[in-house]
Amino acid sequence: MRKDIDGPINATAPEPVRNTEFTQALAQALHRPAMMKFPARILTTLLGEMGRETMVSGQHVLPTRLLNHGFRFTHPALAPALRVITGAKPGRAERPDQENPAQTPLLRSK
């Protein structure tokens, strides 16, 4: 734990993505199709305000304080991070990471 950062921080990825991009990247990491799409109107109708807030709308949040303090993300891009989390190997179209993702932490400070 670092003593030079106090108060709240945004613990988010440095490269935010939309839910559609996340779904596609996760499906790719799992080597599975991303088949289900729900129109926003259906989610809002079925789940009301909770559906709108959690599944339809979004926030563009960045880890500015972490980055300003020199924090470096090991996997700033979504696809390599999902491969580490899921233990998936890169697909044929993807270039393997230079480091061994199974032994690499997701976050690292300078």
Image (tube, helix red, strand yellow):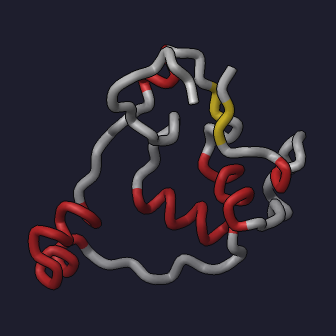
Residue pictured at 68% horizontal, 41% vertical: 75
Count of number-bearing discs: 0
Q: Is residue 10 above or below residue 29?
A: above
In which quarter of the view is residue 71 placed? Answer: top right
Q: Nearer the viewer, residue 93 or 8?
A: 8
Q: Is residue 20 above or below residue 30?
A: above
Residue pictured at 73% horizontal, 45% vertical: 105
Q: Is residue 67 above or below residue 59?
A: above
Quadrant placement of the C terminus: top right
In which quarter of the view is residue 1 placed? Answer: top right
Left/right of residue 103 with respect to residue 16 in the rendered view = right
Spot occupied by residue 19 in the image (x, y as percentages of width and height): 41, 60
Q: Is residue 92 above or below residue 66?
A: below
In which quarter of the view is residue 54 placed? Answer: bottom left
Spot occupied by residue 73 in the image (x, y as percentages of width and height): 64, 33
Residue pictured at 34% horizontal, 26% vertical: 7
Spot occupied by residue 92 in the image (x, y as percentages of width and height): 85, 63
Left/right of residue 73 with respect to residue 17 in the rendered view = right
Q: Nearer the viewer, residue 54 or 35?
A: 54
Residue pictured at 50% horizontal, 82% vertical: 35
Spot occupied by residue 72 in the image (x, y as percentages of width and height): 64, 26
Q: Nearer the viewer, residue 10 or 99?
A: 10
